[in-house]
């Protein structure tokens, strides 16, 4: 790229730029300028770098209320004075600089409180109408000075609020344990008033846009009880807290109460505090460790009372353990600070461990200081003595907020979705995003394959592993198992059966495919011939035997008896690509009408690289085994090569008729060899296991060994070979309630050790479960580390098969019910991602 | 999400914002409708788009924008309600009918619509149009897909390549 675009600037450069912008609103606009910047501004690390040292909010400035003037009737709007270095600094300005004042509402407001950057305002209704009718209308509203958003609540009529609300609290979603959302006003608002001894707590909820009385069952200790300290609640762990003082019990010197309202349940508690202090100048705050505390301000010191060992695990009945309150420490107000008139201060809690106090009169008139409770240091944060505000009395409302949190809350949610997809957003991937939206809605895998062949960019995209991984997130086993091929009836290969079939007397027993839920091949049950061409009924009269890497091995049943006895006809179909491959009939005396074991061998098994020219024909060989039952009853191995389309001459191996194939007929292919499991027919109840191994390349080098697996095999146990999760050959022995795994060691004579035992969970009681038949109870090898077990439960007339995969424990794949299945049931499992890359990747490589 | 709008709603008329398309046509819509776009929502939250200065959308032309806004205006009330609770079956059926007719449009419009929906991040529209294109793809051969989606005619080079694919991947062309 010749010129650098502004969007490509690295984050460090952006930091330098943004840290100089200073103004909040400008930064906010920057954040929504482009996606790259949005991603920068939703990175918490970046935000904390931009505004370092923010603990629980930064003091941005003050809203000043000219209280005296307002009482005289003339409305004045709020003035805003920024704190030094504040990112929100417009100089001296008024509230309507922040908020669009469409209806002249914000020209006469009283600031009540601020919480997480949101102001709670009370609107002064200027019309005389209400005054005449002697109705007190309390109109409150929230306003976010940064975004300019605002909400005006419906008026609240209650006798308790004749003066004004005593206490108020804004409770954000975060306070009730929710997440910070982009919604500015996801808050609840609490107003506390009292009439005589009855406490009224009015709760406003955004969801219903209405007021409700949260409780009326709480009464004050006496009619002389009055509020103490700040009117804005200190919200601590989802509980809003205010202090009350009972003047009626003044002599007892222990008359401080705390009113607590839980944000989530709006339950109310009034608890007596064990604070003994004649000084009534106290207020709630939080200390450095975030504990709720009460600060008592004396002449030259501040006493801090706090709870002991407050672990925050407060239960519903007792929000905080007040009994354990004690005086922790005294903070001496530095004498050199020269506050001759500190008694006229207003004190507020700022952040944890810091107190804010405003000096209204005296030498330091209209100055604001922050007292650190831990170090007892005093810092001046605002000095209005030289400004036009100096001459009047103001009520100050500190405006503070956690800027990183605000940014994340405002714009973070929009960005999270994108983050979930991976790394930072790259605008070059925009086109891919659109295609992703489209392709993710093309559910059929075959359609996607055809899309890949439509044009080159799409081919690139659909062979890109990252894109495919996005399309099929989390390659889970249940995802890879696309369904089952099965037949409702077994074919009978007698003369009469064929005659009946050709005459269409008997119903067809076409192979059927049943999708698992979420299968990429689409839902439901469909005939095999909906995937592949019928080819004059060849694939309609076929029996599925096994499947591997997307190929399904079928035994084809020709339509005349002569053709059937002419030899075994095997065929392959690939339901995704619709490829078909029919091998010539295999005629050998050993085979007759049936075969025993088989092994489907792909190019990859032989260590061959997938040839670029014919990437699709990954199928390489087929090995078929069968005991010759006429001569010496030894085993014959027949190998078929896809390249030459010919069967090799049978290879005889030393596995006599005494041995019977155990487990699945499909071989387990592991490190260049095919393996089958055998048992001894004569010693069936002893359960010795033998393994037949055949070299894949030559289809020779056959070995037949006894496995040193000490099985206490009963008739009901069954065994099969599989590949364990760490890639070792294993024998799984299935008992009624458990499975044992014996795993091959890398080297050494003791090549099988018992690796693990897995308990088989009992079948759901609803299923009329009977012990599965020997064949049905056996599992079959599945993906590495998994095996599939089809559970059959014969109930009334139908049988139900259930796929279960097991790794560390049994996981039920959602039940597929195969009604009335008698024949074989072949699980169809494809790693679709690899399938795409393998089958299409060859097209992208340069051709010779 | 709809906080600023409903805040204004208390004050009477809904807040309007102005959007400016690439060919400088101005569109005035309710902020609630425009806020269906997540991109615009941020700007609107920020206070932009009101009064004289509109929000310029240099990537969207007026024809597309008017179509986009047609969708937004129709879907804004449902989105404001948060969808399910208040919507009756009739409303949903009505929206569905609208959606079906909405995407029954010329391909060129469809593509600019999907680009616009993506740029403006209007989730519902994006998924609606993507679904439409996906439906157009389903069950077709590569040549048919090219024709349906209005790809330019293949260059001789491309044609040769496709022929080669066709030999190899005969199944895909059936």
Image (cartoon, coloured by chain):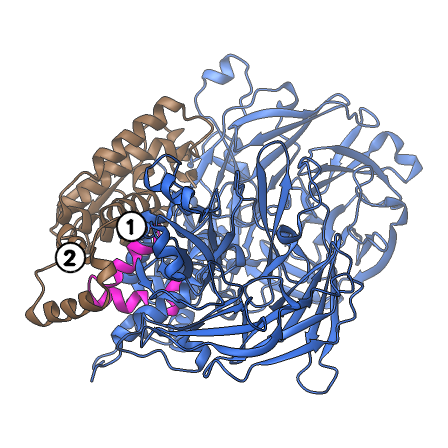
Chain colours: A blue, B brown
Q: Residue at the location (68% across, 67% down)?
A: A679
Label 1: which residue? A534
Query: Is A327 placed left or right of B10 in the picture?
Result: right
Residue B37 shows which numbered tag?
A: none
Q: In which quarter of the image is residue A565?
A: bottom left
| Residue stretch in magenta | A440-469
Q: Mark 2 lies on which chain?
A: B
User: Which residue does the numbered mark 2 point to in the structure image?
Assistant: B143
Tell me if B1 is positioned left or right of A345 in this view.
Answer: left
Q: How many marks?
A: 2
Say which element carries label 1. loop
Which x, y percent locates residue B134?
Answer: 27, 49
Question: For mark 1, does the 10 Å Cα neighbourhood hold few (<14), some (14 to 19), or many (20 or more) residues?
Answer: few
Task: Spot the residue most to the top.
Answer: A133
Q: Which of marks 2 and 1 is in front?
A: 1
Q: Residue at x 86, y 45 (%)?
A: A322
Q: Position of residue A214 (x, y in %)?
A: 67, 27
The main secondary structure of the magenta stretch is helix
Q: Which residue lies at the image location 37% right of the left edge and 61% below the top edge?
A: A566
Q: Is residue B108 magenta?
A: no
Residues marked 2 and 1, same chain: no
**A836 or A650, nearer to the observer:** A650
């Amino acid at each position: 790229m010749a010129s650098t675009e502004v969007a490509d600037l690295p984050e460090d450069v952006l930091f330098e730029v943004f840290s100089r912008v200073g103004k909040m609103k400008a930064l906010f606009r920057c954040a929504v300028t482009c996606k790259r910047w949005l991603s920068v501004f939703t990175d918490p690390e970046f935000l904390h770098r931009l505004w370092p040292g923010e603990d629980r909010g930064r003091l941005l400035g003050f809203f000043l209320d000219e209280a005296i003037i307002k009482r005289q009737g003339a409305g004045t709007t709020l003035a805003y004075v920024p704190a030094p270095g504040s990112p929100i600094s417009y100089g001296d300005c008024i509230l309507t600089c922040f908020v669009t004042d469409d209806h002249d509402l914000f020209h006469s407001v009283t600031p009540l409180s601020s919480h997480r950057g949101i102001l709670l305002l009370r609107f002064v209704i200027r019309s005389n109408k209400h005054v005449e009718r002697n109705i007190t209308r309390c109109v409150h509203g929230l306003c976010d000075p940064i975004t300019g958003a605002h909400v005006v609540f419906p008026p609240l009529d209650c006798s308790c609020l004749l003066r004004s609300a005593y206490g108020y609290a804004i409770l954000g979603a975060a306070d009730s344990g929710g997440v910070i959302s982009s919604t500015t006003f996801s808050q609840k608002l609490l107003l506390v008033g009292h009439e005589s001894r009855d406490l009224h707590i009015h709760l406003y909820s955004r969801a219903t846009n209405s007021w409700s009385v949260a409780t009326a069952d709480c009464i004050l200790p006496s009619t002389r009880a009055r509020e103490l300290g700040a009117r804005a609640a200190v919200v601590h762990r989802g509980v809003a807290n205010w202090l009350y003082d009972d003047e009626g019990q003044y002599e007892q010197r222990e008359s401080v109460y705390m009113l607590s309202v839980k944000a989530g349940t709006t339950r109310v508690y009034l608890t007596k505090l064990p604070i003994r202090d004649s000084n009534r100048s106290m207020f709630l705050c939080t200390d450095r460790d975030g504990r709720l505390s009460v600060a008592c301000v004396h002449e030259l010191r501040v006493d801090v009372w706090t709870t002991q060992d407050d672990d925050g695990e407060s239960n519903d009945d007792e929000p905080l353990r007040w009994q354990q309150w004690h005086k922790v420490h005294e903070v001496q107000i530095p004498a050199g600070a020269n506050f001759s008139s500190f008694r006229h201060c207003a004190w507020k809690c700022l952040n944890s461990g810091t107190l804010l106090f405003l000096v209204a009169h005296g030498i330091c008139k209209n100055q604001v200081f922050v007292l650190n409770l831990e170090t007892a240091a005093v810092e001046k944060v605002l000095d209005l003595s030289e400004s036009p505000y100096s001459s009047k009395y103001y009520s100050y409302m500190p405006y503070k907020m956690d800027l990183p949190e605000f940014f994340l809350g405002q714009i973070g949610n929009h960005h999270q979705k994108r983050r979930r997809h991976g790394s930072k957003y790259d605008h070059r991937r925009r086109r891919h995003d659109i295609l992703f939206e489209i392709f993710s809605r093309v559910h059929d895998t075959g359609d996607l394959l055809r899309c890949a062949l439509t044009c080159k960019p799409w081919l690139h995209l659909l062979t890109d592993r990252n894109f495919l991984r996005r399309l099929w997130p989390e390659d889970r086993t249940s995802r890879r198992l696309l369904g089952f091929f099965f037949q409702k009836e077994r074919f009978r290969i007698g003369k009469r059966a064929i005659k009946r079939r050709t005459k269409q007397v008997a119903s067809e027993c076409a192979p059927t495919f049943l999708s698992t839920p979420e299968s990429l091949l689409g839902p439901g049950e469909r005939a095999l011939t909906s995937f592949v061409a019928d080819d004059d009924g060849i694939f309609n009269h076929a029996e599925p035997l096994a499947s591997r890497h997307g190929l399904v091995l079928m035994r084809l049943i020709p339509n005349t008896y002569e053709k059937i006895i002419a030899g075994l006809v095997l065929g392959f179909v690939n339901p995704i690509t619709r490829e078909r491959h029919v091998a010539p009939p295999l005629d050998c005396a050993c085979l007759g009408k049936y075969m025993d074991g088989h092994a489907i061998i792909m190019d990859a098994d032989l260590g061959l690289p997938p040839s670029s020219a014919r990437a699709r024909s990954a199928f390489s060989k087929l090995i078929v085994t069968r005991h010759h039952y006429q001569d010496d009853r030894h085993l014959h191995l027949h190998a078929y090569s896809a390249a030459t389309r010919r069967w090799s001459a049978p290879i005889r191996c030393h596995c006599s008729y005494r041995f019977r194939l155990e487990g699945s007929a499909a071989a387990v292919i592991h490190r260049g060899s095919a393996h089958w499991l055998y048992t001894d027919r004569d010693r069936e109840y002893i359960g010795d296991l033998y393994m037949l191994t055949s070299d894949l390349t030559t289809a020779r080098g056959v070995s037949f060994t006894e496995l040193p697996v000490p099985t206490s095999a009963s008739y009901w146990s069954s065994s099969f070979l599989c590949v364990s999760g760490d890639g070792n050959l294993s024998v799984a022995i299935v008992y009624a309630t458990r499975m044992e795994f014996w795993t091959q060691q890398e080297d050494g004579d003791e090549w099988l050790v018992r690796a693990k035992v897995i308990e088989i969970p009992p079948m759901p009681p609803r299923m009329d479960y009977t012990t599965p038949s020997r064949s049905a109870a056996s599992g079959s090898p599945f993906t590495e580390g998994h095996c599939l077990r089809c559970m059959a439960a014969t109930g009334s007339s139908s049988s139900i098969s259930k796929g279960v995969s097991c790794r560390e424990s049994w996981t039920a794949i959602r039940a597929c019910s195969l009604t009335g299945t008698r024949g074989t049931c072949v699980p169809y499992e494809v790693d679709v991602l690899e399938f795409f890359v393998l089958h299409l990747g060859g097209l992208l490589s340069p051709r010779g | 999400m709809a906080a600023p709008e409903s805040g204004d709603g208390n004050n009477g008329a809904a807040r309007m914002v102005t959007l400016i398309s690439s060919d400088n046509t101005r569109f005035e819509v309710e902020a609630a409708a425009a806020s269906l776009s997540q991109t615009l929502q941020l700007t609107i939250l920020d206070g932009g788009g009101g009064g004289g200065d509109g929000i310029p959308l240099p990537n969207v032309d007026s024809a597309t924008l008017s179509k986009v806004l047609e969708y937004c205006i129709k879907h804004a009330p449902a989105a404001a309600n948060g969808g399910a609770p208040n919507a009756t079956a009739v409303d949903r059926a009505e929206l569905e009918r609208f959606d079906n007719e909405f995407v029954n449009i010329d391909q060129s419009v469809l593509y600019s619509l999907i680009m616009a929906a993506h740029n403006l991040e209007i989730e519902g529209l994006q998924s609606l149009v993507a679904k439409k294109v996906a439906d157009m793809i389903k069950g077709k051969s590569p040549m048919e897909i090219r024709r349906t989606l209005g790809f330019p005619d293949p260059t001789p080079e491309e044609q040769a390549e496709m022929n080669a694919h066709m030999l190899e991947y005969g199944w895909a062309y059936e």
